Structures are given as structure tokens and as C-alpha cells.
Amino acid sequence: MAMVAFGDRTSIAAWVELPDDDAGAYVWKTVDLADVKGSLIPRDDPQVEAVCADGAGRILILQESPPRVELLDWAARTVATRIALEIPAGHPLHDSWVDAESSQGEGAAFMQNGHLLIAKEKDPAAFVEFGPAGDEPSGFGPTSALQGGARWPTDDGDHVFVPLAVWNPSVKLAAVCEDFSDLEVGPDRNLYLLSDKSQSIARLGELVVGDPVARADEVWELPFLDGKPEGLALTRNGRAMVALDTKRAKENLVLLDPPIAAGDRA
């Protein structure tokens, strides 16, 4: 089980294999995106807002503007897939999605059917299932999230994904998570949401097709953190790791206790 980190100021990715003991040694490896063939993400100011990795060791990078993702094959040092995330005119989210001053994707999660779940930060905050035009949405839950160790099923090359389903936060979820800053699938296969403005983490119930409301099963308030919580990961033992946006890259990854997710079921 590995964790991947990517900054939004420089195009350098880092990853680490998580130790069995959460308090164990973390040995990081890095790769500069400039050394990856086919990437369109600029080296300076890449505007990367989320990363996630599949079981084949490929890393998905979500760029906020323009809204798109790249699936990187680190072993081959190449981009396997580029996907534009487009919301057509007339869709309720279109105007805020195409506005460069607004907020687009802030979190991403793989789905078994090759779709992507994207968390839109604000104005309005929403969860969007993206996939090829004409596909049926599946919703998101423990049975539709990509299985641990599995390869995300997508073809190489350039593609366009469009919204297949949208879920807006319930009144309660909007109150405890004022904005959406990152998504993470836990070792219990539930979906967890990080909120920067509310300084909180929420465990979400299943996102069901036909029910456009996203609800929180449980919420945890974060302790005082010296920085903006922008990234979320969960260890194999269910502890939350929060990445902070700080002026200096020092002590900006925080391991929290006690665990909030059940242990690894893989």
C-alpha cells in the first residue's frame, strides 16, 4: 500500500510505501514530471489538485484548470491516458466549471467501470461521476470503487469524459464540510471527504443513482493544524494523514490518531 503526493507549485511527484506500523519509517521516492513523456501539465504552477494511484502503479493527476486528468505510467516514464473533463453548455454546473476564477475538481477516486468520481470544491460543491458520453452512471460505494490492487480499466490515448450523475451535499453535510478539498477511499472501502474551510473529515454514505443527495455517516473535527488541510490519505490501519498547504515545505504531513476507518480488508 503506497501513498502519493504532488504539489501544486512544482511538477514533482513523491510516493512512499506505507509501513505496517503507521509510526514506522517513511522512505520517499520522487519523479519530476518534466521527465515524463507526453505530459501537458506545466512545470511551473501545474495547478494539480488531486492524485490517486491504481493497483498497476499508475498515478492519476487531476489538474484544476483546464479541467483534465493525466494517467501516468511511472515505470515507462510516459502518460498513458489524457482525459478532458467537460461539462456541456446548459448543464447546471457548466458556468462555474468553465470559469477560470471559479473552482473545478479538488478530489478524485477511481471506479471499477472506468469512470471517475470528482469532488468539485465549491460554488457549488458537488460530487460528479464522469465517464464517456452515453455511458450509464453506477453511483459510488464500496462495490463500485476500484478494488485494491486492481488496474483502472481505461484505454490509452486521449479521451473526453462528461458528467453522468451529480450529487449535491445534504444540509447537514454542507454545514460540516463547507467546501470539498480532497477525496479518499479508505481501507474499509468507504469514501472520505476532507474540508479545508470546516477543518473536518466526513465519511460519506453511498452515492446512489436517482438520489441526488450526498450524506455524511460520521464527521470528525480536525485538531488545530498550522496550515490549510488540502490533501487526505488513509493508512492501511485506518489513520488519517492530512497534507497541509504551508509557506514552507516542512512538517506539512500530519498523522492523526485514533484511526477513523476499519483496517485493510484486501
Image (spheres, grey):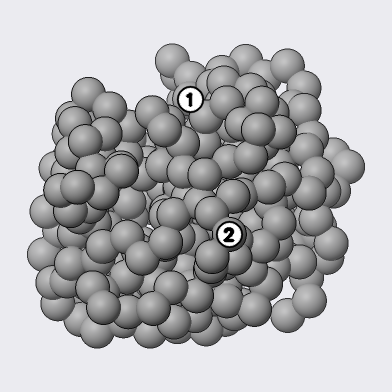
> In the rendered structure, which disc, 1 or 2, sits on the residue that comes first in sequence?
2
Type of amino acid at the residue the image marks with label 1: Asp
Find residue 154 and report its horizontal and vertical position in percent: 31, 81
Residue 259, above or below 46: below
Type of amino acid at the residue the image marks with label 2: Asp
Q: Nearer the viewer, residue 253 or 41?
A: 41
| Residue underneath mark 2 | 211
Q: Is residue 53 visible?
A: no
Q: Nearer the viewer, residue 30 or 226?
A: 226
Residue 119, above or below 60: above
Q: Nearer the viewer, residue 80 or 115?
A: 115
Q: Name the residue at 78% across, 76% down.
A: 265
Q: Name the residue at 54% across, 65% down.
A: 210
Instruction: Assess disc 2: are there few (<14), some (14-19) or many (≥20) residues with their C-alpha within 10 Å of its C-alpha.
Output: few
| Residue underneath mark 1 | 245
Residue 36, above or below 182: below
The quadrant in which residue 103 appears is: top left
Q: Name the residue at 13% across, 72% down.
A: 158
Find residue 156 and report its horizontal and vertical position in percent: 20, 81
Tally of numbered tags: 2
Q: Is residue 263 visible?
A: yes
Find residue 30 and report its horizontal and vertical position in percent: 38, 52
Instruction: Assess disc 1: are there few (<14), some (14-19) or many (≥20) residues with their C-alpha within 10 Å of its C-alpha.
Output: some
SS of the residue under disc 1: strand
